[in-house]
Amino acid sequence: MSEDTDEDRIIFIDNNGLLSILYVSESILASGKPLSVNVQTDLTFQFLSWFPEALVEFMKPPADGGLHAGAMITADENVDGEMLSIYRIQSPSGYGVINRSRCHWRYNPETTFEDQRVRFTDYVLFNAGMLDWMKAGSWRND
C-alpha cells in the first residue's frame, strides 16, 4: 500500500519476509533547492495487526482504563520480538511508533544506538484509510 499526502508517501514493502515502511518526502527549501527525505523503518508483519488495537488502547481516556492524563507515550510492548511503543505527535497531529529493537540505519549499533521510528499523521490514519487497511488484513499472504 502506498498513501500519498501532498508530496509525502508511505510505502509498505515485504522485505524478505519482514515489513519495511518507507517514508518519502519531497519539498523545496526557501533557497529554492529541492529537499528529499527518505526514511526506512523495519518491523515484523505482526506490527500491522498490533498497531490498530494498540492505538485504540492508547486513545482510551483514563476513566476507561487508558493511560494517565497527559501521557504521551506507552510502555514498550513485545510484538513478535520487537520492543514497540506508541507516542502522540503534536505537529502535524498524529501518532508515531518507536522500535527499540532495531538501530536507526545511519548508526553503527556497536558504537552508537538510536531506535527506529515511524510517524503517521491523523489524516493518513483516519481519513486516507491506512488504519482501515491495517484492520482489514488484506496485506496478509495466508
Image (cartoon, grey):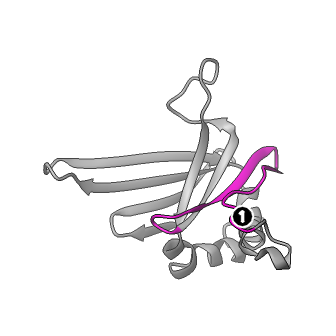
Percent across and percent down for residue 3 are 47, 69
Q: Locate residue 37 relative to residue 70 in the image: left or right.
A: left
Q: Quadrant of residue 104?
A: top right
Q: Residues within 10 Å of mark 1 (few under 14, many from 20)?
A: some
Q: Locate residue 62 relative to residue 45 in the image: left or right.
A: right
Work out whether 87 lies above or below 126.
above
Query: Residue at position x 42%, y 62% from top?
Result: 9
Quadrant of the image containing the N terminus: bottom right
Q: Which residue is mark 1?
A: 51
Percent across and percent down for residue 108 are 57, 23
- Mark 1 lies on a secondary structure that is helix
Q: Quadrant of residue 141?
A: bottom right
Q: Which of the two residues, 62 or 101, is positioned nearer the viewer here?
A: 62
Which residue extends farthest left? 32
Q: Which residues are magenta?
A: 69-93
Q: Which of the two residues, 77 or 63, is positioned nearer the viewer here?
A: 63
Check disc 1 and give the amino acid type: Phe
> In the rendered image, is residue 141 in sight?
no
Q: Locate residue 77 relative to residue 13 in the image: left or right.
A: right
Work out whether 47 lies above or below 5.
above
